[in-house]
Amino acid sequence: MPDKVVDLRSDTVTLPTPEMRRAMAEAELGDDVFSEDPTVNLLEELAAERMGKEAAVLVTSGTQGNLVGVLSHTQRGDEVIVGHQAHVFHYEVAGCAVVGGVQFRTVRNVDGMLDLAELEAAIRPPNVHHPRTSLICIENTHNRDGGAVLDVAQTRSIAEVARRHGVSVHLDGARIFNAAVACGVPARALAADVDSVTFCLSKGLSAPVGSVLCGNEVYIETARKYRKMLGGGMRQAGIIAAAGVVALNTMVDRLAEDHENARVLAEGLAELPGIVLDPKKVRTDIVIFDVISPIGADGLVRALKAKGVLCNVAAPGRIRMVTHYGIVRSDVEWAIRCARDVLEGVTVGAR
Ligand SMILES: Cc1ncc(COP(=O)(O)O)c(C=O)c1O
């Protein structure tokens, strides 16, 4: 591996800022299972305020946030409607089915959005044969849909369908601050119409660990029990929360830089032979593109790795790159140059 490494695999590779490390070292601590860690309490208050919800609970990860979030809305045997590209459907080890005994039903999603007619048709009417539809899960920004953003009106239109049928809405807002920055609205505007929202501190916001689940008081009380059941009751968790507080206070507005770098990356890649990419669709920090070059997506990932540029295959023939706090403009320019060198050197039929 060359000395210079440009790591575009994910915004989860971000390292804590010096201010986070200082805050972690100096954090006031207590036992959070007794709700006595002042730094966790501060983070939870701040998170609830940012999401416009009554209460919040710190969880270990986005996956635990979604699992606790879904369990706290549902009973065994319920059905949960999710987009067919949802993270909770593809990448969370079927936790909601295994632990919660719920069944997922998928509805097509395009650019992160659910088709409203299809969504409404998927909600089950009461019938002795049917599971009860109790929850709709949405995702903003949308990971597999290339960081696509749902705006306030789109979120509201989904919530209105849910409300008409007495169904709750959970928002997987792992990257909700990216969505907020892209839309130019506060995050709470994007969470206003949903019953619960979880967001990650350890993606673009660069904290080392943790996510927060937000909702009303009763819901969060239930969530605390499920978190404990799942082994997520942490003791002096203020060490983690301290970085989260810094993340919320200092790292949100700078996400615009990541979006700008992603746009430059997308525009550069779109010009290369063998890449299919519409840069206009890139609105946040995720760039996903198809590889039609004979080298293939796996071959391109390998060739880039040999040059020190790291990225992942997101699906067959498809590569994902993500910009973040550890990536500056010259890194993006370098990644484009490396991709150009590889793709222009590929001869038809070579693999
Ligand atoms: C949309 C979305 N939800 C949830 C998660 C899960 O987060 P974690 O890796 O912290 O479990 C991710 C992780 O990439 C994600 O992209």
Image: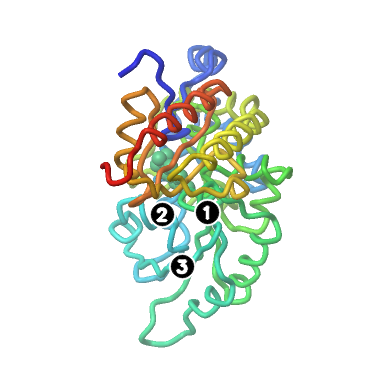
Q: Secondary structure at mark 2?
A: helix
Q: Which residue is mark 3?
A: 81
Residue 151 located left or right of residue 325: right
Ligand 1 in which quarter: top left
**Which x, y percent locates residue 84?**
43, 63
Please name the amino acid that badge 2 sits on: Val
Residue shown at the point (48%, 68%) measured from the top left: 108
Q: Secondary structure at mark 3?
A: strand
- Location of the N terminus by quadrant is top left
Which numbered circle lies on residue 139? 1
Q: Earlier in the sequence, mark 2 or mark 1?
A: 2
Front residue of 185/198: it is: 185
The residues tagged by marks 1 and 3 sit, at their Cα atoms, a distance apart of 12 Å
Disc 2 vs disc 1: Cβ atoms closer than 8 Å?
yes
Q: Earlier in the sequence, mark 2 or mark 3?
A: 3
Which numbered circle lies on residue 88? 2
The residues tagged by marks 2 and 3 sit, at their Cα atoms, a distance apart of 11 Å
In which quadrant of the rendered view does residue 175 lie?
A: top right
For label 1, the crowd category at 10 Å Cα-Cα, with few meaning under 14, some 14 to 19 and many 20 or more, is many
Residue at mark 2: C-beta within 8 A of ligand 1: yes
- Location of the C terminus by quadrant is top left
Q: Secondary structure at mark 1?
A: strand
Residue shown at the point (53%, 33%) measured from the top left: 204
Please name the amino acid that badge 1 sits on: Glu
* Residue 189 seen: yes
Please name the amino acid that badge 3 sits on: Ile
Relative to 134, residue 29 above or below:
above
Q: Earlier in the sequence, mark 1 or mark 3?
A: 3
